[in-house]
């Protein structure tokens, strides 16, 4: 494979620019979020792309907040975005804000008016939209397009001073009302907003539009490559036109290039739709573990490494596609398999009584914390006459393919003894309340006896009843039953909510679970990966399921295809 073939298409662009005269020291990238919500998995890919390029080329990466809309932006979101980027393991070179450039942008806009490249329009937004035309028909020039320069300057000053009502006047660039690109038909550069801004307070009454702000901010910061998602491809012509008006050959000219958004299945990433989930109480907040926000994924138990690996593996492309969430889940399983402490917890318990085990006796058996990590060490777990196992791990009668506990057959208890089911006790409704077993005292795991080497087909996890720690377990699953819930134009995406996306149960764990702290990761053996939630108290530990050990949805999909 050649060097070019091993690079993604954005890296190829950078390499060609370096070959054609760019200096290595001129490379500079940026991540430019709008602080109007929490970052989600789509943003994580963009973060990994831009900061990853910074690491690859040893180039600075700015964090620039696109804070030009005070009606939606808040300091809370600024803080959350910074927290998420740091958690992902990245450091920005400079923390900057579009609002840092409000004066410079205003000064340039005044010069635009003086040069006949911008004018103040007194039309309503509806009138402006109507006279813009359609993709197949040219637009009509505003009756204010040729307003005298001095009049536009005076009105623009009034807009700036707060002497104009919202929606009464806008500043528009004078470009081409017949352009096939609708964005070039005299776009709005400024609108009046009498709103408090999270950084500038009430100093400014006019706020620049995204298209005017973004490219000029890149230019001020001397960003070499401005990478954004594919929906901004039509904006590139306007990005370049605005740059043409202020560009000086003494400076670096930014280059905008676009990559395809990667959508994740069984969720939505539109901020508007995520906000609906929060506002309508479908989820508990922006960091609900079912949300695709970075804070939600973190609370669910995802690791920074798993998200970075996911982003790097799906890569960047030129065509949008839907990435199955199972690929994200694969990455967190792979990472947690190396890191998570193995513990035992029983989610749906039935009691086992070992009838030939001495009453009142207890042992503390040694077991590995993580067989994948030789430095993880050992811990001790208590064993006694009465244990909990999972109800589904026992049947009175079963066929030869059932390798768990059944009457008359043996299984090994993980890190403990071999037991044999002898009889059951049932309540008045016929439900099994106890399984009576016998054990082989010479079969303890790791004891080196001949009996301990004896092979039995099933191994079960368990918890000692006298030592069992009650825990709250939140079994999270995919938020939607449909892979693309917002792709149905005739139906509301909320119609596809998964009614089983959260089940909360009381389970029983080994006593060591009391020692784990918030965000610590564990594997409940034979069940899945879990993390300690911040709702934990001194009275009860709360564990969120990150992912099951295996992808149960893959089996469901296979069964649906086979029918």
Image (cartoon, rainbow, N blue to C red):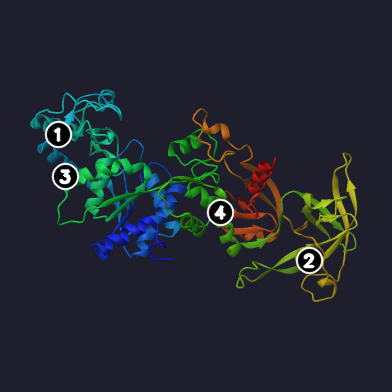
User: Would residue 388 be visible to someone looking at this image?
Assistant: yes
Say what secondary structure mark 2 lies in: loop
Specify few, some or many for label 4: CA neighbours under 10 Å numbering under 14, 14-19, or 20 or more.
many
| Cα gap from disc 2 to disc 1, whole angstroms | 81 Å
| Residue highlighted by disc 4 | 301
Q: Secondary structure at mark 3?
A: helix
Give the quadrant of the N terminus. Answer: bottom left
Identified at 81% across, 55% down, the residue is 401
Residue where numbered disc 2 is placed:
416
The x, y position of residue 74, in whole percent, is 36, 42
Q: Earlier in the sequence, mark 2 or mark 4?
A: 4
Residue matched to label 3: 245
**In front: mark 3 or mark 4?**
3
C-alpha gap between disc 4 and disc 1 = 52 Å
Compute the Cα span from label 1 to label 3. 21 Å
Q: Nearer the viewer, residue 559 or 495?
A: 559
* Rendered location of residue 122, percent (x, y): 19, 25
Q: What element does badge 4 sit on? A: loop
């Amino acid at each position: 494979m050649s060097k070019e073939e091993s690079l993604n298409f954005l890296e190829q662009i950078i390499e060609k620019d370096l070959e054609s005269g760019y200096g290595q020291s001129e490379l500079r990238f940026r991540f430019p979020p709008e602080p109007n919500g929490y970052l989600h998995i789509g943003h994580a890919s963009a973060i990994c792309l831009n900061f990853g390029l910074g690491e690859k080329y040893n180039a600075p990466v700015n964090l620039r907040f696109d804070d030009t809309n005070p009606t939606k932006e808040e300091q809370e979101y600024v803080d959350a975005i910074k927290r998420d980027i740091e958690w992902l393991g990245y450091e920005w070179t400079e923390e900057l804000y579009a609002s840092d450039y409000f004066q410079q942008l205003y000064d340039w806009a005044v010069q635009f008016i003086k040069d006949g490249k911008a004018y103040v329009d007194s039309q309503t937004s509806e009138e402006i939209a109507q006279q813009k035309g359609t993709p197949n028909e040219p637009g009509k020039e505003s009756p204010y397009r040729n307003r005298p320069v001095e009049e536009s300057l005076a009105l623009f000053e009034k807009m700036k001073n707060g002497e104009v009502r919202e929606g009464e006047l806008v500043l528009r660039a004078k470009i081409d009302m017949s352009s096939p690109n609708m964005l070039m038909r005299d776009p709005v550069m400024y609108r009046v907003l009498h709103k408090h801004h999270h950084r500038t307070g009430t100093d400014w009454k006019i706020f620049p539009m995204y298209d005017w702000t973004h490219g000029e901010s890149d230019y001020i910061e001397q960003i070499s490559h401005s990478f954004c998602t594919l929906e901004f491809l039509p904006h590139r012509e306007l990005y370049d036109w605005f740059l043409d008006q202020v560009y000086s050959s003494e400076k670096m000219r930014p280059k905008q290039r676009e990559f395809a958004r990667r959508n994740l299945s069984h969720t939505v990433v539109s901020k508007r739709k995520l906000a609906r989930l929060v506002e309508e109480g479908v989820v508990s907040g922006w960091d609900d573990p079912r949300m695709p926000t970075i804070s939600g994924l973190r609370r669910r138990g995802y690791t920074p490494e798993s998200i970075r690996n996911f982003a790097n593996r799906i890569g960047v492309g030129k065509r949008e596609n839907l990435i199955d969430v199972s690929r994200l889940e694969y990455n967190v399983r792979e990472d947690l398999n190396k890191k998570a402490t193995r513990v035992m917890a029983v989610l749906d318990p039935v009691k086992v009584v070992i009838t030939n085990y001495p009453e009142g006796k207890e042992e503390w058996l040694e077991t590995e914390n993580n067989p994948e990590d030789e430095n993880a060490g050992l811990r001790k777990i208590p064993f006694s006459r009465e244990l909990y196992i999972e109800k589904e791990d026992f049947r009175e009668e079963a066929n030869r393919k059932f390798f768990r506990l059944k009457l008359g057959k043996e299984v090994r208890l993980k890190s403990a003894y071999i037991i044999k089911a002898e009889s059951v006790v049932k309540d008045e409704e016929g439900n099994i309340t106890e399984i009576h077993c016998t054990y082989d005292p010479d079969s303890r795991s790791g004891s080196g006896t001949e009996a301990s080497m004896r092979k039995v087909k099933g191994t079960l996890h368990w918890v000692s009843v006298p030592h069992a720690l009650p825990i709250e377990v939140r079994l999270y699953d995919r938020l939607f039953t449909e892979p693309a819930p917002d792709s149905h134009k005739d139906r509301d995406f909320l119609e596809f909510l998964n009614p089983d996306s959260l089940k909360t149960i009381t389970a029983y764990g080994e006593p060591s679970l009391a020692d784990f702290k918030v965000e610590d990761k564990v594997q409940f053996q034979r069940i899945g990966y879990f993390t300690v939630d911040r709702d934990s108290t001194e009275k009860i530990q709360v564990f969120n399921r990150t992912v099951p050990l295996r992808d149960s949805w893959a089996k469901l999909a296979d069964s649906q295809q086979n029918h």
